[in-house]
Image: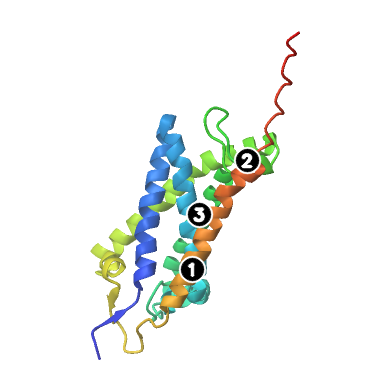
Amino acid sequence: MSDSIKVWDAPLRLFHWSLALAVGAAMLSGWLGGNLIVWHGRLGLLILGLLAFRLLWGLLGSTYARWSRILAAPLRLGDYLRGRWRQAGHNPLGALSVLALLGLAAFQVLTGLTASDDIAFQGPLYRLVEADTSAWLTGLHRQAWWLLLGLIGLHLLAVLYYARVRRRPLLRAMIGGRSPREYPEQREAVGGAPWALAVALAGALLLVWAVRSAEGWLAPPPAPAAPAALDW
């Protein structure tokens, strides 16, 4: 029996690092504003696609990427706190962290799609809501920036704690995909076939295309041209 097991499949690892980079860049561009606000909107669409991919991959991916595992883990929080957790993948606290981060990222994307800064930026779905509603959602989008920053900070501190105190290489596992086998009953991840990857990618791309195209579909028709003056 090998002393390590495959836990995180390649698509999940690529998603993880892509989301980290995209969220970091989006937060920085939103904070700096100015001409970068255009890139802030583009990064929001990228994050939308990544989250859509993760949603589908949680249904089609390998063992420890599945929502059935992640959603069930917090129900065993009591066992984990009493030292009875022996499963690979996300432990109950890790699963709660994943759900909180992905949920808040999704909230930021959805509010950003209808946001407006009244100067140079309007989300692609801005015209679906009233101006007052857009202003309210824009305010929530800005305020949640601090909450997201706090969650990211807690996530990084947890990774550091597990690396330094618990001696568990979480970072190495998310890079290489393999983790030490701590208990004999832990098994390698299975599933995540190429067809599943193709479906998840296609679904994510289709959603981003639809949202991006909606900006044109929702735009008011051009004003009719003024009649030409008669030359007597």
Is residue 171 rendered to the left or right of residue 47? left
| Residue that appears at 34% across and 70% down | 10
Q: Residue furthest front?
A: 232
Q: Quadrant of the C terminus?
A: top right
Q: Residue furthest top?
A: 232
Give the Cα separation between the discs numbered 3 and 1. Answer: 13 Å
Q: Which residue is mark 3?
A: 48
Q: Secondary structure at mark 2?
A: helix
Q: Nearer the viewer, residue 85 or 217?
A: 217
Earlier in the chain: of badge 3 and badge 2, it is 3
Please state the horizontal and vertical placement of residue 198, each as a whole percent of the image. 45, 71
Please state the horizontal and vertical placement of residue 137, each as a whole percent of the image. 61, 41
| Residue that appears at 53% across and 48% down | 108
Q: Secondary structure at mark 1?
A: helix
Q: In the rendered image of this protein, does residue 180 appear above or below residue 102?
A: below
Q: In the rendered image of this protein, does residue 211 appear above or below residue 28?
A: below
Q: Which residue is mark 2?
A: 126
Amino acid type of disc 2?
A: Tyr
Q: Nearer the viewer, residue 117 or 196?
A: 196
| Residue that appears at 73% across and 14% down | 229
Amino acid type of disc 1?
A: Ala
- Can you tell which quarter of the image residue 132 is in? top right
Q: Which residue is mark 1?
A: 200
Q: Quadrant of the N terminus?
A: bottom left
Earlier in the chain: of badge 2 and badge 1, it is 2
Residue 178 appears in view: yes
Is residue 211 rendered to the left or right of residue 230? left
Mark identifier at residue 117: none
Q: Residue furthest bottom?
A: 1
